[in-house]
């Protein structure tokens, strides 16, 4: 990944002016270069940029381009995963600063794959893409029962719950979780997004979810829209 | 003796052009050297990388038999043990029907076409969107399969999505399947604890426990592996418990190339074969010599979106390769084919189904599964598609039958007779003898002239299929479950399909 071609000039990130560095970070996120992203993020911090500004202009900006090209079929799933991983390398540096200064993410999300189901590739992708869009994501893993979902929501203060299922036999469990949210009187405090290959909009409506997201890019768009209308 | 037309028709009608279990094996996407390399790599994987998360009963038996846990806590199978287990697993197994005329002999290169994908949607006749599938749909699908000569057994093609209780769902699914067809039933269970209560009902359907075991017409199984190379607890338990059904365990694994299996097709064959053998080994550790059907189903990802694509050229060739490997072991084989990505029975569905099914069948796969009715990458069932697919399967099976070459069929004498005689073959004895049994005639494919087609209102095959489904389903209400027994079953089990919806004149048909 770090191969430089003979005819290509060596790029020294620390020598780039701010605007070019931001552009370079966008390119490096696009190319999924995690070490470069960590380096670029650190340089901006050293130059006195606020963590919020770095997050928005450099990292989320880069992932937005990735999201658009994924939606348009230019980037493939493995490339998006690499971009998300690269962005994460920058986030690792920003996270402690952001939380110390009390900056709130644009939304807090809990994602997990429902009880009985351990197929989690799609869910992982959604989690990473949401992080890429500036959400704080708590991934509670696979085979999750209603209590675990609800405890995670309470502990993190999440306002979005994302549930996934790949199996036709496990997808009905999503309704169990939603019913439990209602039972505990916290359904209204929480946006419920569902996804997974066998699902569709109709199913999402029937079980009382807020939206069905057919892929990771859609999940990000829906989450952003819902958060902005909610606030 | 008078040799009338009627007797000739009668005698030729009993020998159809195609039948279940004709021998394939002429198509081999892998060379012998490829087979050996894949085999060695499979053994390396099972011996060194092993399987994660074995259920306790399997782990216990496996360790006793010489398996070991590696430093990552994974269950590893020494190559000698794998080869012994392959040798000790039955090579020829039977799927019995309620009716013996539907008995299937799986093994060798014998090709059978049946099975389906537990979809959650139906594409109704003429519809352009899906709706959630129900219990009645399973019953109707069973009645249709009952009348489809080229669909050789029945499995849960769709899920009764309206039934929330999983035990009730499994029992009801089994009930409507047995009510709809006398072909062999391939069952799946959401939980191992559902096997015994379902069996209790099967005993009643068969007449008694003894009668069920005289002719065990159901088998169980499923997907006991989470790719890559990890046992899934629920389905492992279901597979082991399904031994009680006294019929081969159907093991299927579906790693998806590029996502849960290597993107390189050879690697995806390696992993899917290793995982399918791991499923087979699981049964052999618990019950040595118990019959299994081994199904490596290497799925393919469309890496632009990450979604599964069942209709691609990659899917066709990688599935054929996987079937070839299981046949190389001499074990009863299964792969998925016909899993079109098209949402309705159209040109895309036709070419994707035709290509994938033909290659799997030509490879000699014993169970070309998912091959009838499935739409939208296994997301829906279309009964229109099912009757079209029955034609497709007949056509594919005709190619599997191939060209019989012998002195008689080489036809030197016939050619000589005709050239010196009538000048055409239409009246020749050979033509009369072969015109029925030697040729497969589709029920739906349009072979009319363009003028006839226009005169009929220029119908397309989907319209014709819709008519055929309606005609077949409005009249065929079999009595496979004795009414007295049915009443007793309804007393004991929560059967959710009312009797009046299982007879002519119901609201559906």
Image: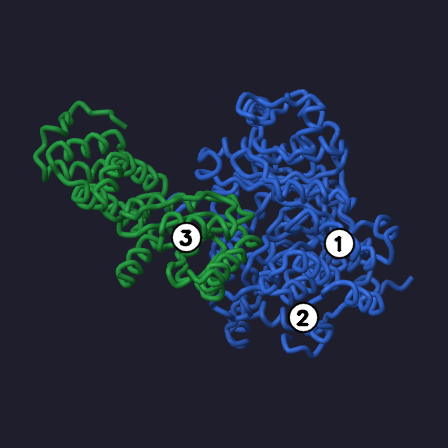
Chain colours: A green, B blue
Q: Mark 3, chain letter?
A: A
Residue neighbourhood size for the residue with mark 3, other residues' Cα within 10 Å, grouped as few (<14), some (14–19), many (≥20): many
Q: Which residue is mark 3?
A: A162
Which callout, 3 or 2, points to the residue nearer the camera? Answer: 3
The residues tagged by marks 3 and 2 sit, at their Cα atoms, a distance apart of: 42 Å
Q: Mark 1, chain letter?
A: B
Q: Which residue is mark 1?
A: B197
Q: Answer with the quarter of the image where residue B14 lies.
A: bottom right
Secondary structure under the numbered disc 3 in the rendered image:
strand
Find residue B71 and report its horizontal and vertical position in percent: 54, 21
Front residue (pair A30, B27): A30
Could you tell whether B342 is left or right of B338 in the image? left
The residues tagged by marks 1 and 3 sit, at their Cα atoms, a distance apart of: 35 Å
Q: Answer with the quarter of the image where residue B423 lies.
A: bottom right
Q: Mark 2, chain letter?
A: B
Query: Relative to residue B12, is residue B314 depicted above or below?
Result: above
- Inspect this view and state whether residue B210 appears: yes
Q: Which residue is mark 2?
A: B473
Query: Relative to residue A213, is residue B43 depicted above or below?
Result: above
């Amino acid at each position: 990944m770090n191969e430089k071609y003979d005819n290509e000039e060596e790029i020294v990130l620390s020598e780039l002016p701010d605007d070019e560095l931001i552009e370079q970070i966008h390119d490096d996120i696009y190319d999924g270069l995690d070490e470069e992203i960590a380096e670029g993020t650190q340089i901006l911090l050293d130059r006195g940029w606020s963590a919020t500004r770095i997050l928005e202009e450099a990292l989320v900006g880069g992932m937005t381009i990735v999201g658009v090209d994924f939606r348009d079929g230019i980037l493939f799933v493995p490339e998006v995963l690499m971009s998300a991983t690269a962005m994460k390398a920058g986030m690792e540096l920003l996270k402690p600063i952001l939380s110390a200064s009390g900056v709130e993410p644009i939304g807090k999300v809990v994602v997990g794959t429902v009880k009985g189901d351990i197929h989690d590739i799609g869910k992982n992708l959604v989690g990473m893409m949401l992080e890429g869009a500036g959400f704080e994501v708590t991934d509670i893993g696979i085979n999750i029962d209603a209590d675990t979902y609800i405890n995670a929501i309470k502990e993190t203060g999440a306002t979005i719950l994302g549930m996934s299922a790949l199996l036709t036999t496990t997808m009905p469990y999503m309704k169990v979780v939603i019913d439990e949210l209602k039972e505990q009187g916290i359904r209204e405090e929480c946006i419920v997004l569902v996804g997974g290959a066998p699902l569709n909009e109709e199913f999402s409506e029937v079980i009382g979810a807020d939206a069905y997201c057919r892929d990771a890019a859609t999940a990000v768009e829906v989450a952003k829209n819902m958060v902005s209308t909610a606030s | 003796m008078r040799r009338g037309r009627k007797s000739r028709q009668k005698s030729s009608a009993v020998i159809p052009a195609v039948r279940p279990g004709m021998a394939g094996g002429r198509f081999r996407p892998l060379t012998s050297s490829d087979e050996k390399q894949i085999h060695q790599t499979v053994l390396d994987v099972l011996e060194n990388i092993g399987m994660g998360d074995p259920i306790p009963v399997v782990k216990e038996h496996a360790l006793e038999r010489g398996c070991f846990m590696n430093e990552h806590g994974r269950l590893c199978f020494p190559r000698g043990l794998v080869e012994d287990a392959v040798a000790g697993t039955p090579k020829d197994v039977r799927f019995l029907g309620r009716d013996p005329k539907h008995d299937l002999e799986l093994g060798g290169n014998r090709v059978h076409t049946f099975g389906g994908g537990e979809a959650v949607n139906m594409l109704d006749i003429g519809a352009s969107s899906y709706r959630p599938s129900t219990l009645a749909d399973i019953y109707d699908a069973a009645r249709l399969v009952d009348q489809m000569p080229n669909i050789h057994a029945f499995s849960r093609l769709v899920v009764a999505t309206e039934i929330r209780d999983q035990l009730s769902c499994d029992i009801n699914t089994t009930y409507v399947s047995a009510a709809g067809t006398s072909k062999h039933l391939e069952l799946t269970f959401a939980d191992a604890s559902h096997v015994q209560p379902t069996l209790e009902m099967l005993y009643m359907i068969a007449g008694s426990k003894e009668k069920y075991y005289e002719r065990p017409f159901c088998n169980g199984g499923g997907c006991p592996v989470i790719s890559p190379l990890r046992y899934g607890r629920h389905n492992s338990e279901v597979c082991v418990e399904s031994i009680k059904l006294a019929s081969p365990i159907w093991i299927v694994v579906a790693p998806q190339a590029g996502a849960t299996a290597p993107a390189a097709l050879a690697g995806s064959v390696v992993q899917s074969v290793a995982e399918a053998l791991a499923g087979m080994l699981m049964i052999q550790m618990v019950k040595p010599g118990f019959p299994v059907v081994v199904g490596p189903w290497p799925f393919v990802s469309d890496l632009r979106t990450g979604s599964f694509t069942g209709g691609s050229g990659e899917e066709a060739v990688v599935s054929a390769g996987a079937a070839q490997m299981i046949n190389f072991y001499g074990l009863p084989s299964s792969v998925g084919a016909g899993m079109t990505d098209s949402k309705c029975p159209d040109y895309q569905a036709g070419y994707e189904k035709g290509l994938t099914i033909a290659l799997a069948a030509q490879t000699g796969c014993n169970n070309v599964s998912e091959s009838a009715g499935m739409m939208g990458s296994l997301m829906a069932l279309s009964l229109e598609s099912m009757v079209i697919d029955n034609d497709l399967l007949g056509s594919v099976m005709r190619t599997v039958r191939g060209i019989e070459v012998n002195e008689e069929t080489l036809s030197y004498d016939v050619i000589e007779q005709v050239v010196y005689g009538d000048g055409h073959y239409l009246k020749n004895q050979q033509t009369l003898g072969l015109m029925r049994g030697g040729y497969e005639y589709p029920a739906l494919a349009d072979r009319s002239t363009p003028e006839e087609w226009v005169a009929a209102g220029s119908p397309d095959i989907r319209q014709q299929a819709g008519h055929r489904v309606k005609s077949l389903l409005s009249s065929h209400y079999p009595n496979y479950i004795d009414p007295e027994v049915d009443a007793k079953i309804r007393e004991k089990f929560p059967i959710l399909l009312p009797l009046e919806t299982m007879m002519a004149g119901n609201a559906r048909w």
